[in-house]
């Protein structure tokens, strides 16, 4: 869809509003992520807030609103740096978060993430059938808000569906925080001499994501869930009996072994994904070079084809390596590794550039497959810390001893932090560009907006981390108080660095995962040749790696969406019916996302994990039964409401 140049897009007020939202959302996400290990997606809440505010000003456009959500989307992604950097405090390398170094790690990784994902747009956004569930949902929100759908009656119906689903989704999420109904249905049980669990998050957002990703991806994730929880966990627990709580027994082996198996599957699936998309990516880069050459000759390009010029992208990426080199030198100088600084910095820069490019492609593909907020960037973090640590083992060997080991662990964490920034931003950038494609935005303006969002987010992360570190501390750090923050991913990644450098990493499960990944690739290719439902290996990998509580509702949502779409295609107005279904899923995501923002702020102000709880643990069984019944009844009612409105 091509827009007219007269429409306002990259405006000062849009950037300012996006920057303010980014600062607020980043602070909230950093706190929530450190406290409970989760962050919330920010694109859709930012789009809703932007529409509400810009409506008060003259001349606001859908493209200007899109720029606001593009800037603000950096909040949900950059905040993921908390999954790495607190590890530097946990190992005693840092005692606080030095402003310049912390901001530079975040900003340089984020800017590289933007640059590396620019030439991927044509391959992974334009010339692809990836569902991009959050990108589609954000576009639907913007289009409905702007009244861009043809026909007032249809626009009104769509808006009502979006609003009602958002209200129900948010209200249910709020009600779960009172603990009168639960937000997760879970139980553990024995399987022979072993054990396993069944759990599902009562989340309308995940149900909506499942609807949007479709049956193939949902089935792949469901297969991964079965492999992880009903094959691996029972086998591992049977081989290693533990007394006491069943749930703790199961969780120990899922976290300690199954997730590493999943990381191995992610690794080999990522390599296969790179092989499969290599042709389209190279074609996309050639297309970008051709567009840049045409622009240089004065030829006009359609707005939707105007990326940042590829020469600028390459130049910006190379220039970004200079502050990274300074940052790495600052870590090394005067320490145990100073004598090897040239080799270490050179190796790290090559690692960041080469692995960063590969990770940008894989994360962009994962975002297109299941959405940015559900993409397992922590799995990429595991692979990155293993890769950077192995690079150091190649230079220094294992067990280098004393101060050298501590310095190597810190160095590996900082290199991983930069690569993590590449992963999170490329994960988000292509989702934003999908939204832009659907609303007719100019790609280069979105790419500039995301760089601005990276800068805004990088400015606020260091002081927020320092406030939380000084006020609460982190679990495992000497002197941490009773309210210390868990920072679970940072603890895992720093422990992995120690394990690789000492030779104690869980290579066995990683190796098994690689072997399983090869089998899954062969299975998917065979299904493709037989023209049966395909099971993308990366989707299966995500099903193994992510918690069942996330995977089960997503899989159920994909099946529900398939049944709805099958009905829609037979209805009197198939296009309208399918669009109403998309808006139903979008509303589920919008409501819970908006509540996620508010809840993060409430948690921060109150200092409590459960600030709205009205009942205690003794009410868990009624909360489970009541919550499950209410969730199913509301889901049935929302889809029935959608079908009533899907009649022209």
Image (tube, grey):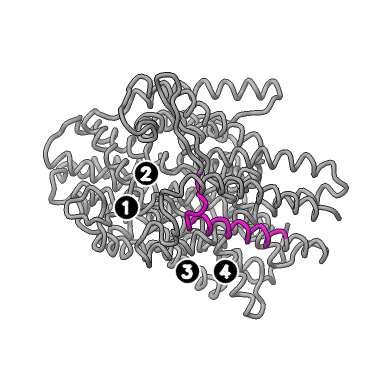
Disc number lying in front (1 or 3): 3
Viewer-side label of 3, 2:
3
Please tell me whether mark 2 or mark 4 is closer to you in this view: 4
Give the structural element (helix, strand or loop) at label 4: helix
Local SS, label 3: helix
Give the magenta part as a residue range. Answer: 161-184
Reading the image, the residue beneath label 4 is 49
User: Residue 529 in the image: x percent, y percent?
Assistant: 68, 21
Q: Is residue 175 magenta?
A: yes
Indicate which disc residue 137 carries.
Answer: none
Which comes sooner in the sequence, label 3 or label 4?
A: 3
The alpha-carbon separation of the residues under discs 3 and 2 comes to: 28 Å
What is the C-alpha distance between the residues marked 3 and 4? Answer: 13 Å
Query: Is the residue 431 above or below the residue 144 in the image?
Result: above
Residue 336 vs 390, above or below: the answer is below
- Marks 2 & 4, CB-CB < 8 Å contact: no
Is mark 2 in CB contact (under 8 Å) with mark 1? yes
Counting residues from the start of the chain, the first of labels 1 and 3 encountered is 3
Residue 391 in which image quadrant: top left
Q: Earlier in the sequence, mark 2 or mark 4?
A: 4
| Dot placed on the residue nearer the N-terminal end, 4 or 1 | 4
Query: What label sits on residue 324 in the rendered view?
Result: 1
Which residue lies under the disc numbered 3?
19
Q: Which residue occupies the foreground of this view, 350 or 615? A: 615
Secondary-structure class at tag 1: helix
- Res. 26 in view: no
């Amino acid at each position: 869809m091509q827009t007219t140049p007269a429409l306002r897009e990259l405006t000062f007020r849009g950037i300012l509003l996006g920057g303010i939202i980014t600062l607020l959302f980043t602070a909230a996400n950093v706190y929530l992520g450190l406290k409970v290990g989760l962050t919330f997606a920010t694109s859709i809440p930012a789009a809703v807030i932007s529409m509400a505010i810009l409506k008060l000003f003259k001349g606001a456009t859908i493209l200007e609103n899109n720029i606001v959500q593009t800037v603000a989307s950096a909040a949900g992604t950059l905040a993921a740096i908390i999954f790495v950097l607190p590890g530097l405090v946990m190992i005693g390398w840092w005692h606080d978060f030095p402003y310049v170094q912390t901001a530079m790690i975040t900003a340089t990784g984020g800017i590289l993430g933007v640059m590396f994902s620019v030439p991927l747009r044509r391959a992974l956004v334009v010339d692809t059938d990836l569902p991009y569930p959050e990108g589609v949902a954000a576009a639907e929100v913007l289009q409905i808000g702007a009244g861009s759908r043809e026909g007032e009656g249809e626009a009104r119906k769509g808006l009502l569906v979006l609003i009602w689903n958002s209200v129900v989704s948010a209200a249910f999420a709020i009600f779960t925080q009172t603990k009168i109904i639960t937000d997760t249905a879970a139980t553990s049980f024995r399987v022979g001499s072993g054990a396993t669990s069944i759990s599902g998050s009562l989340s309308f957002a995940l149900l909506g994501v499942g609807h949007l990703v479709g049956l193939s991806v949902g089935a792949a994730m469901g297969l991964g869930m079965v492999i992880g929880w009903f094959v691996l966990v029972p086998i591992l627990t049977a081989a290693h009996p533990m007394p006491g709580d069943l749930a703790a027994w199961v969780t120990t082996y899922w976290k300690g072994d199954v997730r590493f198996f999943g990381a191995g599957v992610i690794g080999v699936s990522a390599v296969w994904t790179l092989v499969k998309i290599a042709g389209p990516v190279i074609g996309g880069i050639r297309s970008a070079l051709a567009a840049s050459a045409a622009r240089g000759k004065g030829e006009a390009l359609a707005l939707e084809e105007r990326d940042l010029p590829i020469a600028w992208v390459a130049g910006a990426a190379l220039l970004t390596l200079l502050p990274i080199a300074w940052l790495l030198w600052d870590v090394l100088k005067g320490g145990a590794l100073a004598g090897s600084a040239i080799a270490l910095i050179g190796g790290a820069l090559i690692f960041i550039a080469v692995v960063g490019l590969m990770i940008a492609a894989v994360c962009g593909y994962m975002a297109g497959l299941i959405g940015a907020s559900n993409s397992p960037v922590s799995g990429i973090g595991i692979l990155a810390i293993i890769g950077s640590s192995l690079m150091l083992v190649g230079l220094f060997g294992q067990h280098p001893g004393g101060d050298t080991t501590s310095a190597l662990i810190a160095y590996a964490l900082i290199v991983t932090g930069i690569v993590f920034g590449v992963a999170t931003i490329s994960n988000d950038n292509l989702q934003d560009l999908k939204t832009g494609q659907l609303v007719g935005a100019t790609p280069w303006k979105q790419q500039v907006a995301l760089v601005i969002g990276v800068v805004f987010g990088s400015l606020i992360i260091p002081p927020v981390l320092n406030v939380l570190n000084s006020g609460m501390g982190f679990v495992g750090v000497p002197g941490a108080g009773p309210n210390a923050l868990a920072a679970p991913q940072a603890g895992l990644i720093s422990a992995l660095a120690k394990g690789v450098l000492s030779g104690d990493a869980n290579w066995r499960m990683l190796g098994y995962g690689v072997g399983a990944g090869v089998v899954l690739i062969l299975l998917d290719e065979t299904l493709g040749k037989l023209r049966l439902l395909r099971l993308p290996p990366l989707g299966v990998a995500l099903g193994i790696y992510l918690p069942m509580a996330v995977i089960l509702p997503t899989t159920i949502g994909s099946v529900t969406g398939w049944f709805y779409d099958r009905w829609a295609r037979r209805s009197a107005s198939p296009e309208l019916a399918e669009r109403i279904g998309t808006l139903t899923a979008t509303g589920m995501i919008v409501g819970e996302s908006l509540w996620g923002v508010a809840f993060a702020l409430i948690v921060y102000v109150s200092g409590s994990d459960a600030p709205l709880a009205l009942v205690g643990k003794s009410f868990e069984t009624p909360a489970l039964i009541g919550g499950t019944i209410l969730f199913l009844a509301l889901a049935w009612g929302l889809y029935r409401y959608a079908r009533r409105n899907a009649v022209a």
